[in-house]
Image (tube, helix red, strand yellow):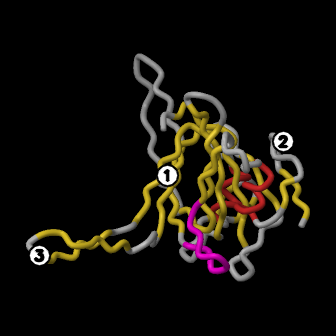
């Protein structure tokens, strides 16, 4: 299916034991989202050919996000770092928290396709600078995360199509975050009720 654009990138920190969230935050400036899914199929040969194919299921998923700007307030939540006097502290034992991430892409015909990666961790991103030359070349942020199945339902990710008769944005966010989003169109941090 052809899609145009990317918008409404959101995340929530997921409690590592209960897998619950309390707040969903929107990140402005989403440029790209690349989802790589790990699954393998094994061929069984018989009668001089392929007799059957056995699927292994989805073991994990990798998400790479391109952002115009990953702000400090989002880095502290997503990466689990401390900020002291405006300085981000990256310790040798820094362990980012689990997060749930959602976004939507406009369908070429009409409506949106919604994505959710349900439980994973982002790695501390590398940084690269470049001197300014004759023309301006903006350096943007990127961050990569590994996602795994949730324990409570074994789901790794969700894809929703708002053109389906039974789809609602409320149902999608409820299934992704486990709680009801009170205002899914709000641009800032969204308070949630259980």
Residue 151 drawn at (x, y percent):
63, 80
Q: Which residue is mark 2?
A: 186
Which quadrant holds the C terminus?
bottom right
Q: Which residue is mark 1?
A: 64
Q: Taking 67 as reference, is 23 left or right? A: right
Q: Taking 22 as reference, is 96 left or right? A: left
Residue 27 drawn at (x, y percent):
70, 45
Marked residue nearer the N-terminal end (1 or 3): 3
Instruction: Evaluate if marks 2 and 3 touch, with contact meaning CB atoms under 8 Å apart.
Output: no
Seen at 77% across and 66% down, the residue is: 178
83 or 67: nearer the viewer = 67
Q: Which residue is mark 3?
A: 47
Residue 50 drawn at (x, y percent):
18, 69
Name the image quarter holding residue 88: bottom right
Name the image quarter holding residue 57: bottom left
Q: CA distance from mark 1 to mark 3?
A: 43 Å
Marked residue nearer the N-terminal end (2 or 1): 1
Q: Measured along the vertical axis of the image, is residue 175 above or below residue 64?
A: below
Seen at 48% across and 34% down, the residue is: 2
Q: Nearer the viewer, mark 2 or mark 1?
A: 2
Residue 12 drawn at (x, y percent):
73, 60
Q: Taking 59 as reference, is 190 left or right? A: right
Residue lying furthest bottom: 17
Q: CA distance from mark 2 to mark 1?
A: 24 Å
Marked residue nearer the N-terminal end (2 or 3): 3
Could you classify mark 3 by the number of other residues whose Cα lies within 10 Å: few (under 14), some (14-19), or many (20 or more)?
Answer: few
Q: CA distance from mark 2 to mark 3?
A: 60 Å
Q: Nearer the viewer, mark 1 or mark 3?
A: 3
Q: Nearer the viewer, mark 2 or mark 3?
A: 3
Residue lying furthest front: 47
Q: What residue range appears in magenta?
A: 149-157
Seen at 72% across and 75% down, the residue is: 19
């Amino acid at each position: 299916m052809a899609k145009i654009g990317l918008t409404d990138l959101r995340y929530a920190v997921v409690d590592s034991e209960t897998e619950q969230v309390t707040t969903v935050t929107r990140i402005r400036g989403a440029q790209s989202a690349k989802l790589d899914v790990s699954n393998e199929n094994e061929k069984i040969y018989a009668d001089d050919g392929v007799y059957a194919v056995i699927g292994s299921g989805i073991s994990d998923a990798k998400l790479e996000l391109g952002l115009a700007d990953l702000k400090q307030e989002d880095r502290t939540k997503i990466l689990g770092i401390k900020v002291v006097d405006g300085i981000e502290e990256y310790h040798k034992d820094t362990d980012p928290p689990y997060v749930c991430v959602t976004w939507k892409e406009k369908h070429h015909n009409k409506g949106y396709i919604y994505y959710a990666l349900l439980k994973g961790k982002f790695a501390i991103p590398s940084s690269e600078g470049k001197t300014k030359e004759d023309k301006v070349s903006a350096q943007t942020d990127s961050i990569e995360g590994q996602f795994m199945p949730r324990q409570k339902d074994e789901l790794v990710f969700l894809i929703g199509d708002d053109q389906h008769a039974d789809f609602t944005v409320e149902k999608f966010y409820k299934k992704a975050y486990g709680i009801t989003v009170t205002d899914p169109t709000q641009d800032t941090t969204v308070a949630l009720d259980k």
